[in-house]
Amino acid sequence: QETGKDKKKPNLQVVERKPAVFVQVNRKSTIQKARLKLPILAEEQQIMETINENPVVILAGETGSGKTTQVPQFLYEAGYALKKMIAITEPRRVAAISMSQRVADEMNLTSKEVSYLIRFEGNVTDETKIKFMTDGVLLKEVQSDFLLRKYSVVILDEAHERSVYTDILIGLLSRIVPLRKKRGDPLKLIIMSATLRLEDFTNNQRLFKITPPVIKVDARQFPVTIHFNKRTNENYLKEAFNKAVKIHTKLPDGGILIFVTGQQEVNTLVRKLRKAFPLRHKDNQSNKNEGDSDSENSDKEIEDDLKQTLKRRKKVKPVPKINLDDYSVPGDNEDLNLEEEINTDSEDEDFGDVNIVSNNQPLWVLPLFSLLPSHKQAEVFKPPPEGCRLCIVSTNVAETSLTIPNIKYVIDTGKTKVKLYDKVTGVTSYIVTWTSKASADQRAGRAGRLGPGHCYRLYSSAVFNDTFQEFSVPEIQQKPVDDLYLQMKCMNIDKVVNFPFPTVPDLLQLQTADKRLEILGALKNSKVTPLGRAISRFPVLPRFGKMLALSHQQNLLPYTICIVAALSVQEVLLETPILQTNSQEVKNIRQKWAAIRRQWAGVGNSLLLGDPMVFLRAVGAAEYANSEGSLEKFCLENGLRQKAITEIRKLRIQLTNEIKTNIPNSDIIVDPKLSPPSDIQAKLLRQIMLAGMGDQVARKIMPEEIKEDQDKTKFKYAYHANNIEEPVFLHQGSVLKKTLPEFVVYQEIYETNKMYMRGVTAIEPEWLPIYVPNACQLSTPLKDPEPKYDSQSDKILCIVSGTFGSQAWPVPNVEI
Ligand code: ADP
Ligand code: MG
């Protein structure tokens, strides 16, 4: 069933008939004018009638048609927020925050009434009527109130993005909606999506008994001319830069939007473009500063970007000439004569010496990515300063979640960054790969909002046709599902395999999650345990949840909270100084930082606690500096990423509050300047690390295990880890490199040129059967009628055979 008219031409006329309005909204006239131009306004009556008559409705419309900003307002005016709230979920935090602000502005309401809630912050009040939230947050709410009784309607936005949480919510809500109906308290479900692959939701017997109606909203989309490159140059950043230069210097007015893969690439390109087209504008200075401070956002992505860039550099072959045809656009018959070579030596030269053709028009270059502070994100919605051309360099957040006005030219590198995850071993790696045809088309579409536009694809049509997949793989098939699996078990969904997923995850993924949760003690015979329930209440991964749950018993909560927070934030400790000078200086700084970290690690149990100990000290010391007003300086000198420190603080507060609500009588407070743990506490923390990471144990590779023909020196920091054949290594900056403990647990293994362990703590093997009994095989069962008595130590001993790793490990006798 499909409603909605097929309009061929853009329809600028707004239908006069309006649905009954129950709640008056007093919008400013400028806002009202802008709204009336949105195509979705013409469909309001039809949309509201369909919603009123059907429990589930699918609303599909191109990006920018007004779904996110307008549908909540339609519902509000129709009285859906009179008794209960209107919920709207976004897969991205950026969108939840900025859309709530936009809707509040449009409705002339405050953030008390149109609010947002994301994992670690929000501004929801008792007066909230429209609540924007991330999909993960709503999923947590289902757990405490399965029927979602606070809401009269749930809108799942950006369903085409196929985020794991949205997928699960669709499945859950397909059951919640009929239950609410039975109770005489109906809940409406609206699934909003770009117009792609709707069949996963409509043509899915498992999901909805009655196929929901689909309303399609036409966006006022103008034709976009696609220009493929003849050749595909591996250095897409340079290509993107050149293309932007050419557009800006040769082509008529109109904003430029460039798609690259990550924050670091955004920052690099923004810097290059600002350098190439310095603003002679009075805002010059602020514009420049902004770029500089952005480059501080060096998180995990930066590292990966650099690595990718390095990898790419190795492969780049000199391209002697740029094909002039690549740049031709209709009406552009300037004779461009550029002879360039790719120089692989330094980043700067990578871009070549650009001779800027005299163009007096300034270029207003802005970055856009998820982690950009929201006030800076808001910049992209503002018109550029007079006389400037707008140029936005963005990750794929501009693909569908945010609509940027006034874009006429899109430059698409065709690339996207994905986190790959090995379903069995859990090894993660980031790779830059081709995006899908569907998302390339979305990107191109961004150019046709203002008028006819152009999309420059920096790859050949052959690559597009032969290499690009039709759609991106839904996230649920790419990510560990442990937390979801546990949450479902807590909701008494026994057979997770039978859950109505829009796309079913791999059976192997589900089995691995089951196994890991069993080792953690969250499940027993596939049923959730009391510990499992406690774990699932924490808004962190199950392994972290277990660490928190255990710490309560040990009075170690403030430390564990700090460790969990630090492990959840990417790249707290910098490896290379941001302000690079020469290589000798870089080397000196690195050495200085390494010394500081060794000092932070301390001795004895502190040292053996490893990375978490370094984090504890780093965070404590940074907070000390912060209270004295010298955080920035402190971070710079000690190799800490300032943003990470601030984020850790937020997380600590959030987790502390979470625990307070879960454990009524707990009196824990956040002491920012946490003093370091005592030796005994450090030992207990090592055990807690083991309890949480018990499925991720690694054992040092002994000299006798190294084959004759192998280079022994290469195995100095090598370990055997669970299920992984290849050796894994202590990471570069690990403070445990000197100690080389026999057994360690690790938080994550990531792969670059080798496999490295991150978040490493030394453990004692005899703790294994106590903290992770499910992962051990006791050759003499604990309840053996005749346990071995060791008179020397006056202990009963039991022999444990380690089943960790690809081979049985010699684990010593264990005291009972
Ligand atoms: P959709 O959800 O269908 O993609 P949106 O509701 O997000 O569409 O956007 C509708 C219009 O509102 C777009 O033209 C967009 O440019 C505009 N818009 C959205 N947010 C803002 C903002 N913060 N400032 C100015 N305009 C905005
Ligand atoms: Mg939207």
Image (cartoon, helix red, strand yellow):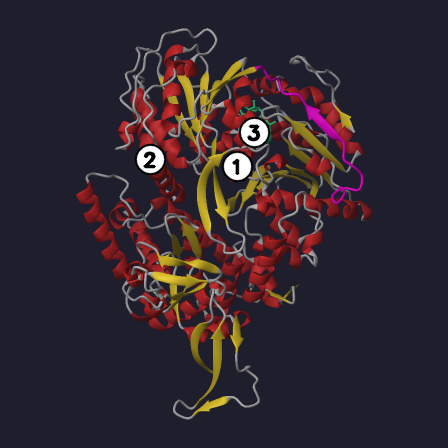
User: Element at badge 2?
Assistant: helix
Disc 1 to disc 3: CB gap under 8 Å:
no
User: Residue 703: where, in percent of width, then height?
Assistant: 32, 68
Q: Is residue 714 above or below residue 782?
A: above
Crowd tier of the residue under label 2, counting other residues whose Cα lies within 10 Å: few below 14, some 14–19, many 20 or above: some
Q: Is residue 400 visible?
A: no
Q: Position of residue 658 (x, y in %)?
A: 53, 56
Where residue 724 sits: x, y (%)?
Answer: 46, 59
Q: Would you name the residue on which mark 3 appears? A: 437
- Residue 555 in sight here: yes
Stretch of the chain drawn in magenta: 205-223
Quarter location, residue 615:
bottom left
Of the numbered discs in the image, which one, if any, rests on residue 313?
Answer: 2
- Ligand 2 shows up in which quadrant of the image? top right
Front of the two marks 3 and 2: 2
Q: Label 2 amino acid? A: Arg
